[in-house]
Image: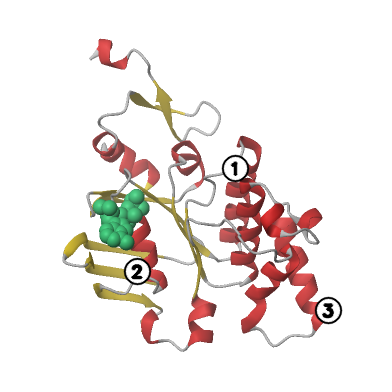
Amino acid sequence: MLTIDLKSAFYGNKQVLADVGFKIQPGQLVAILGDNGSGKTTLLKSIAGVHKTWQGKCQWDDKDLEALPLLERASAIAYLSQTTQSNFPFQVREIITLARFRFREDSKTRDRMVLKAAEQFAVSDLLERRANELSGGEQQRVMLARVFAQESAVALLDEPTAHLDLSHRLAVFQSFRKLCGQGISILCATHDLDASLEYADQLLLLQKGKPIDFGPVDEVVDRNGLTQLFRNAPVEWKRNPFSKRPQVVIHSSYEEKR
Ligand code: ADP
């Protein structure tokens, strides 16, 4: 289980996170929602150990993540940053293969695992291409394949669908669900509100560096957490007629109605 209890996080003397605490069970997909600048990236970077000026604890199975030796840490968490653009002419196969560094395996097993991850994110036909010659969306799917090729218990993903078209966006969330079915936990900062409502188990709502709600999607919606978070957006909350899960509906004349 991933246990997060961040008392604070800073850039210089500016505090950007306060009292963010939650637990994620194996196999759960948790979406972090919040406006720009609410602290989503800083939270993920702090858990990943990329951002270091924070106080509190980030634990995997009661062990402090920052104290774990590199290989153990890599087996606990994998991190996908917001910038997935590759400026170097690495081959896609090489990039995904890098994620296998923690395994002692023969080349046949390694190639099989790389192919499996590539297939999961529909990039198997790009394996021989140079990453810097791919579109933004293709590069993002390559980086997702890399993250999950690491086979860590928890994946920390920063806006993993930002560059994707509708079909790939939904296919990626469906892949997340499959991976969660295999026991992997996913903590994902996203502006993909409709997909989060449909696919996530839990929502963490951040506002100005503070959590305003955390819990199962239905419960957060019932507590009006999303109404509070997106109070300036012309939207209403309905039920998806097919899945019966909460759904965001854009309401262009909402202001007039209010
Ligand atoms: P989000 O991911 O929700 O958009 P961030 O975690 O990126 O939010 O940012 C949280 C706050 O920290 C914002 O006020 C942002 O301006 C500030 N911030 C982010 N990165 C830095 C940095 N490197 N130096 C100083 N302030 C930063």
Residue farthest to the left? 13
Image quadrant, ligand 1: bottom left
Q: Amino acid at mark 3?
A: Lys
Location of residue 106 (image quadrant)? bottom right
- Label 3: how many Cα within 10 Å (few below 14, some 14–19, many 20+): few
Instruction: Find numbered disc 1 in the image and state the secondary structure of the residue it sits on.
Output: loop
Mark 2 to mark 1: distance in Å?
26 Å
Which residue matches tag 2? Answer: 46
Q: Position of residue 33 (x, y in %)?
A: 36, 47
Instruction: Find numbered disc 3 in the image and state the secondary structure of the residue it sits on.
Output: helix
Mark 3 within 8 Å of ligand 1, using the beta carbon: no
Mark 3 to mark 2: distance in Å?
35 Å
Q: Position of residue 28 (x, y in %)?
A: 48, 59
Which residue matches tag 1? Answer: 164
Disc nearest the viewer among 3 and 2: 2
In the depicted view, which residue is nearer to us: 68 or 85? Answer: 85
Whichever of labels 1 and 3 marks the residue nearer the N terminus, that label is 3
Disc nearest the viewer among 1 and 3: 1
Residue farthest to the right? 108
Residue at the location (61% across, 83% down)?
102
Q: Quadrant of the C terminus?
A: top left
Q: Is residue 121 visible?
A: no
Whichever of labels 3 and 2 marks the residue nearer the N terminus, that label is 2
Q: What count of labels does the image hold?
A: 3
Question: Residue 108: which disc?
Answer: 3
In the depicted view, which residue is nearer to us: 200 or 88? Answer: 88
Location of residue 146 (image quadrant)? bottom right
Q: Is residue 123 visible?
A: yes
Question: Residue 240: which disc?
Answer: none
* Drawn side of residue 192 relative to residue 94, left or right: left
Q: Amino acid at mark 2?
A: Ser
Residue at the location (52% across, 79% down)?
74
